[in-house]
Image (tube, helix red, strand yellow):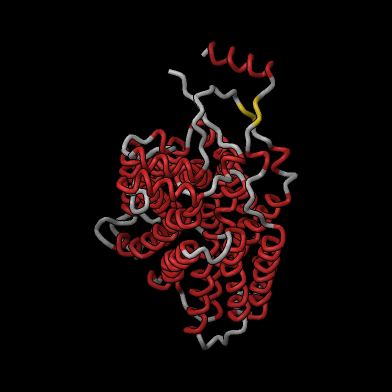
Amino acid sequence: MTVKKIWPTSAAMNVDSTAALADNEASGKAGGCLGLGVRHFQAFLIFAGLSVAYSLRVNLSVAIVAMTDKDTNPDFDAYDWNEQTKSLLLSSFFWGYVVTQVPGGALARKFGGKTTLLCGILFCSIFAILTPIFAQIGDWKLVCALRVAQGLSQGMVFPSTHTLLSQWAPIEDRGNFGTYCYSGSQFGTVVMMASSGVIASSALGWPSIFYLSGGVGVVWAIVWFFWGASTPAQCKMISPEEKKFIEQSIGVGHSDEQHAPVRTPWVKFFTTPAFLVLILTHSTHNWGFWTLLTEIPTYMKNVFHMDIKSNAVLSALPYLAMFLMCFVFSSISSVLNRNQCIPLPVSRKLFNSIGHWVPMVTLIALGYVSSDDSTLAIVLLTVTVGINASTYLGFQVNHIDLSPNFAGVLMGITNCAANIMSIIAPLIVGFIVTDEHDPDQWRIIFFIASGFYLIGNLLFVIFGSTEVQPWNDPQPLPSKEKRNSTQLESQH
């Protein structure tokens, strides 16, 4: 059987979504296209997958406390790992994570987002289940190797998600779908942080943190294998009406012509101002977000004498706020879209400005909070992280706006650059903050993060675009390369 790829053109991508909705109302309202449909079920499955992915990402961060403390649960092994070893283990995930971002996007485009998301989360889940066993066999060295492998497998997750969203999310709901799906990252973080302490001190012990999170990941992979789909055309559950509605909205063609193999326009990616700005915006966002994620616990402990790492509620509170704010901003966006209050470019830049410039102000304010006013510090911290959720309706889905065909590849590129920044940021903190009890040194860190938020969003507001780029239309390979490609396929 010949598999045919239908590539939407820029002209097709600009199909009037209002006309698509009107046509859908006439022919497919009974199919539930304007209400809940299979596309929403797919979004829920992706949400669950990202919840699992983030629980697997942060499980060591919370489990390592019990793994190195004999008093947590004397019935289980404890390891004598110093702070340097623990830092090495916690950072090793990102060594692999950065490497597979760009290849993950290319693989998702070639094999479909369903396959790459399945492989990424399934392999990561299996590695999590093996963690306690590897710790017994090879101590921290084997655990470190497993974390690198988990990072390699999860590098495909975000590019795969963007590839899936480009196929399943109607243009008018693209921001909301992205928000729903990516809110799973906060949900998984909250659940893992809130439950791990209880699990570690129970009869199950710290190994069950890895067994449970890994086991849930395997269950999700089974469900996704049977009910997930890369595109509406490949989904057996979807009604013809809903399939037509989605394809009309995103501009999928209906030609039966066999399309030639296509090449990825790498050079054009990096000569497009809107995409270069997107890389910078994503990178500056990660600088601020990961400065908070990695350094705020240390700041709160040394300046305010609060060990929020040992307090599950305080640890999870900022991410719970971000999870809830995802739905608040999504509801606001839905109202604006339904009433056609603002055009898409303004919407993207508005929500991105909220997600960057409000945290910019609260971060500066946090630097001036008195050391005896810990309550205000927690409120500002929670607001800073929670308001970041607005970016899911801003730059986070802009990759799909620029090029639905190459959204996964674009996400892989920007996420790769952004995660390099998230590795550098804590190193800069260590260079500047020589006295962890000195609030003046911490204030410099907050000013730097705020400066990145200011510059990144300013560039996005000025130069950002939601126009589908001309290179979105894939170019066929030269005839010689097509013959070689065909010969190679016949040999296999």
Q: Which residue occupies 57% across, 43% down?
A: 13
Query: Which quarter of the figure is the N terminus placed in?
Result: top left
Q: Position of residue 281 (x, y in %)?
A: 65, 58
Nearer the observer, 282 or 429: 282
Q: Position of residue 398 (x, y in %)?
A: 59, 53
When the figure is inspected, residue 172 is found, relative to residue 325, above or below; the finding is above
Residue drawn at 55 percent across, 62 percent down: 391
Residue 438 location, quadrant:
bottom right
Up/down of 327 relative to 360, above or below = above
Is 34 positioned to the left or the right of 6 in the image? left
- Left of 272 or right of it: where is 5? left
Q: Residue furthest right?
A: 271
Query: Relative to the observer, which residue lies in front, 149 or 101?
Result: 101
| Quarter location, residue 320 | bottom left
Give 194 or 5, whichever is nearer the viewer: 5
Q: Is residue 473 above or below residue 347?
A: above
Marker count (numbered): 0
Q: Is residue 148 visible?
A: no
Instruction: Pick the residue in front: 445 or 461.
Output: 461
Q: Quadrant of residue 188?
A: bottom left
Q: Residue at x 52, y 59 (%)?
A: 392
Residue 129 horizontal side relative to residue 404, left or right:
left
Residue 409 in sight from this viewpoint: yes
Q: Where in the figure is residue 272, as x and y percent of width and height?
A: 72, 47
